[in-house]
Image (cartoon, rainbow, N blue to C red):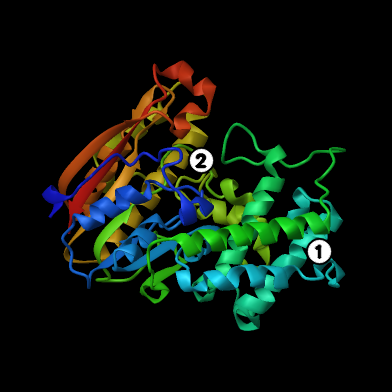
Amino acid sequence: MLDSLVIGSPKRKKNSQSGWTDFFPYYAGFPEDFAKNILQSSGLPSSAVIFDPWNGSGTTTYAAAQLGYASCGIDLNPVMVLVARARSLARTEADSIAPQAKSLTKDVSRLAIKIRENDPLLQWFDVETGNVIRAIESRIRSRLVGTDAADLRAQFDKISCFAATFYVALFTICRRLTAPYRSSNPTWLKTPKGDEAKLTISAKDICSAFVAQATCMADALQKSSFLIDPARVKIAVGNTTEFKVSGLADLILTSPPYCTRIDYTAATRVELALISTLLTENRDDLSRQMIGSIKVPDKIIEPSIFWGETCLKFLDRLRSHDSKASKGYYYKTHLDYFEKMSRSIYNMRASMKRNAIAIMVVQDSYYKDLHNDVPTILGEMAENIGFKMRRREDFIQGNSFLGINSRSRIYRDTSRAVESVICFEK
């Protein structure tokens, strides 16, 4: 099967998506066509189950659903779970979106909602603006999520695709409104400092933008050419280092977080602020749990022989590097990355059926002048855990996160990364 897989470049091209998918411009390790080509060429029967343990914006689960497969996806970031669930909305729901959006915003400024002083939305918005945004979110929560789900909190798998669509519409307009605070790093959002004015937007403008966004989404969904059965798409919050399900998947298609010191929760700061009423932990706690976290781990981690020779040599060279904080902060955060990836790959293998295959899109990186050959490292980890390496395809990328920090280029000749598609069999 692996020899016959059609593996194209996993690079996401500008304007490569259109229609419904345009409304979900969140991080993804590969484009929809890449996923569909692999799944279509896999030769799997229609009864197969496709799994993505780092589902992100739901590219894998959405592609699988279009092809008629049952699919399952988890992600540690609850924002991405809502995004992926909204993406799986059935086309038959399109006619209901615009009327519901108008109902959610009707007389919203008259709601007796007083935003809490510590509401994270107030990092960017003044109190009156924050009140309006929180009032819309409150209506989505009370009308479409339901009291029970809100009381239980964090059970995002129980939030319908329809309800998730309105959260995504609200995410989108708040991202647009906070655009002045975005930096050259696409994952970073600044907050006003000192006397710097916070954003002030009228209730009328916010409500109009929300209804317009929802209406555009409805039009795009109506024009989509695929019929999706949301009942066959299971998407939930999940941590790959703790995920314990055996014999679930016939095929895994995924892209784990890259080892590039990117805080993926920072990319969704506004969205996390919007759904703070549904969360059981704050963004800092969530950030610490993420693979690739920029926070120093709160436990002592020792390198393991099961991580493989390439990984251990890289860590030794990193620890002895003469640049500042190499043997402290940077060594510890890299240990954290590899330890979490090792546990995740172990759990990933356990989730697969006998003779199932796993396809991972991974990217190399650099620490100063040291090449961090993540594809080779994860390949060795997987083999040490019991996987059989069957195929690898490498692609040179020119728009990676490596190029964001100009100071990092002092240490190497290029900021172009190598993205690899590595294929394993259980």
Q: Whole-percent x and y of residue 75?
A: 45, 60
Q: Mark 2: give few (<14), some (14-19) or many (20+) Cα within 10 Å.
A: some
Q: Whole-percent x and y of residue 385?
A: 22, 54
Residue occupying image coordinates x 80% and y 68%:
108
Left/right placement of residue 169 relative to residue 417 reads: right
Q: Which residue is mark 2?
A: 262
Q: Quadrant of residue 208?
A: bottom right
Q: Whole-percent x and y of residue 11?
A: 36, 39
Residue 204 can be seen, yes or no: yes
Residue occupying image coordinates x 55% and y 44%:
295
Left/right placement of residue 376 relative to residue 368 reads: left
Q: Nearer the viewer, residue 144 or 299?
A: 144
Dot 1 falls on a residue whose secondary structure is: loop
Number of numbered tags placed on the structure image? 2
Residue 154 can be seen, yes or no: no
Residue occupying image coordinates x 34% and y 44%:
303
Q: Hey, what amino acid is under mark 2?
A: Ile
Q: Nearer the viewer, residue 302 or 287?
A: 287
Q: Whole-percent x and y of residue 233?
A: 39, 70
Query: Quick one: label 2 or label 1, which is nearer the N terminus?
Result: 1
Q: Nearer the viewer, residue 51 or 285?
A: 51
Q: Which residue is mark 1?
A: 116
Left/right placement of residue 385 relative to residue 28 reads: left
C-alpha gap between disc 2 and disc 1: 30 Å
Q: Hey, what amino acid is under mark 1?
A: Arg
Q: Nearer the viewer, residue 342 or 86?
A: 86
Q: Quadrant of residue 286?
A: bottom right
